[in-house]
């Protein structure tokens, strides 16, 4: 049996455009239009899952998808940095940001470390490998990063080296305990 997982990154939002730690904002008009234009371009799936964030739920809706929120696919918890821009945090806590970006086990913000999100998403992938049919998931970019780190057996430090553009699909297919990876396919307009 071959398992297939298609991870779709959300449409743009003000937080994403401003390099702001997710504050629960909505997708912007351009992101919504891009998602609507790609509606119907994704392959049929046995299940559709969503990161709990507002922007992932709205992206799924604009894509014409009806999904179930999966807590294990939550984006990285930025703790007390939520709602602040990276620039703002750098101005007040440069050492903390430096540690967070270089030490995958560090969580100076009181939220989740990169290593923690990689392990959480890795556990989910271990269960997804045994599911029949395709799983389509609209998830935060850091969930895609964590999945790629796991699939390729990269050290968690590789997490920040992966760029995940909005409205792209990363496809995983696996069998016999091994995953293959297809990165960053843009969603096609209908």
Image (cartoon, rainbow, N blue to C red):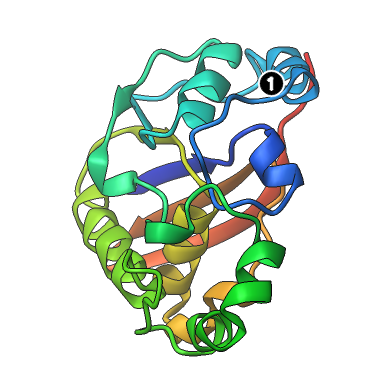
In this rendering, position of residue 118 left or right of residue 162: left
Is 152 rendered above or below residue 130?
below
Q: Is residue 147 above or below residue 101?
A: above
Quarter of the rendering occupied by the C terminus: top right
Residue drawn 58% across the image and 49% down it: 170
Q: Is residue 162 left or right of residue 69?
A: right
Q: Residue at x 42, y 44 (%)?
A: 5
Judge whether residue 9 can be spotted in this image. yes
Residue 189, given in percent of the width and then of the height, sits at 79, 20
Residue 177, quarter of the rendered image: bottom left
Residue name at image x 24 percent, y 36 percent: 132
Residue 62 appears at what percent x and percent y? 60, 13
Q: Which residue, given by chain and number where applicable, does mark 1 sit on?
A: 35
Residue 112: which quarter of the image? bottom left
What crowding class fits label 1: few (fewer than 14 Cα within 10 Å), some (14-19), or many (20 or more)?
A: many
Secondary structure under badge 1? helix
Q: Is residue 167 visible?
A: no
In front: 67, or 185? 67
* Count of all numbered marks drawn on residues in the image: 1
60 to the left or right of 88: left
Residue 78 locus on image (x, y percent): 43, 59
Q: Is residue 108 above or below residue 163?
A: below
User: Percent x, y for residue 31?
Assistant: 73, 25
Q: Quadrant of residue 110?
A: bottom left
Which of 6/146 is in front?
Answer: 146
Q: Nearer the viewer, residue 168 or 6?
A: 168
């Amino acid at each position: 049996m071959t398992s297939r997982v298609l991870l779709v990154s959300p449409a743009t939002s003000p937080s994403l455009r401003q390099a702001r730690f997710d504050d629960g904002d909505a997708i912007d008009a351009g992101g919504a239009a891009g998602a609507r234009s790609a509606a119907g371009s994704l392959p049929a799936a046995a299940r559709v899952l969503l990161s709990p964030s507002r922007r992932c739920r709205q992206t799924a809706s604009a894509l014409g998808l009806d999904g179930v929120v999966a807590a294990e696919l939550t984006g990285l918890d930025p703790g007390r940095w939520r709602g602040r821009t990276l620039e703002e945090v750098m101005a007040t806590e440069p050492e903390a940001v430096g540690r967070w970006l270089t030490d995958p086990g560090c969580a100076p913000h009181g939220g989740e470390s990169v290593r923690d999100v990689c392990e959480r998403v890795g556990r989910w992938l271990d269960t997804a490998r045994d599911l029949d049919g395709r799983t389509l998931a609209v998830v935060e970019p850091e969930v895609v990063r964590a999945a790629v780190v796991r699939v390729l057996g990269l050290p968690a430090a590789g997490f920040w080296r992966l760029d995940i553009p909005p409205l792209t699909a990363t496809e995983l297919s696996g069998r016999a305990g091994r995953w293959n990876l297809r990165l960053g396919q843009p969603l096609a307009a209908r």
